[in-house]
Image: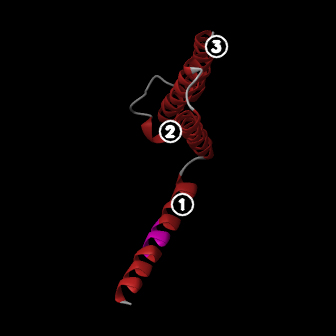
């Protein structure tokens, strides 16, 4: 009985901490960064789905798996770079960078990435 109460208390504490974290995140994080974070979560989900599918169904067209998984990882990295450069708290670390310039780099890197992926598929 005591063990069950302790487990319930831990669960309640974790739930309160997660709600507090979510409230602070939505209150203190600009909307632009939240959109980038959602895109990064999507990239992770795509990579996980591709990896699980490859493990379950096999990797017959291995080039397709490598191209898709590498594209998901690269998109995540590009988004992380965009997030770092557009975060107002990082202005001192990137003094010559603007949000528009960072987005231009993001788009250019994606265009090059997708040409490489399309070429890799054959």
Q: Residues within 10 Å of mark 1 (few under 14, many from 20)?
A: few
Q: Which residue is nearer to you in this view: 89 or 10?
A: 10
Mark-to-mark CA distance, 2 and 3: 32 Å
Residue 111: x percent and y percent?
63, 16
Q: Residues within 10 Å of mark 2 (few under 14, many from 20)?
A: some
Give the label, 2 or 1, closer to the camera. Answer: 1
Q: Does residue 98 show up?
A: no
Q: Which residues are magenta?
A: 13-17
Residue 99: x percent and y percent?
57, 29
Q: Which corner quadrant holds the N terminus?
A: bottom left
Mark-to-mark CA distance, 2 and 1: 18 Å
In the image, is residue 114 above or below residue 33? above
- Quadrant of the rendered image containing residue 58: top right
The residue labelled by disc 3 is: 118
* Drawn side of residue 106 relative to residue 91, left or right: right
Give the label, 2 or 3, closer to the camera. Answer: 3
The residue labelled by disc 2 is: 87
Q: Does residue 67 show up?
A: yes
Residue in the image at 54% along x and 28% along y: 69
Which disc, if any, is residue 22?
Answer: 1
């Amino acid at each position: 009985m005591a063990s069950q109460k302790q487990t319930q208390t831990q669960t309640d504490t974790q739930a309160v901490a997660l709600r507090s974290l979510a409230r602070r995140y939505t209150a203190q994080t600009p909307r632009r960064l939240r959109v980038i974070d959602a895109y990064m979560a999507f990239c992770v989900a795509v990579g996980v789905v591709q990896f699980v599918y490859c493990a379950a169904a096999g990797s017959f067209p291995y080039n397709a798996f490598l191209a898709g998984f590498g594209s998901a990882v690269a998109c995540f990295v590009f988004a992380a770079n965009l997030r770092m450069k557009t975060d107002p708290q990082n202005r001192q670390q990137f003094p010559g960078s603007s949000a528009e310039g960072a987005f231009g780099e993001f788009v250019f890197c994606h265009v090059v990435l997708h040409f490489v992926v399309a070429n890799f598929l054959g």
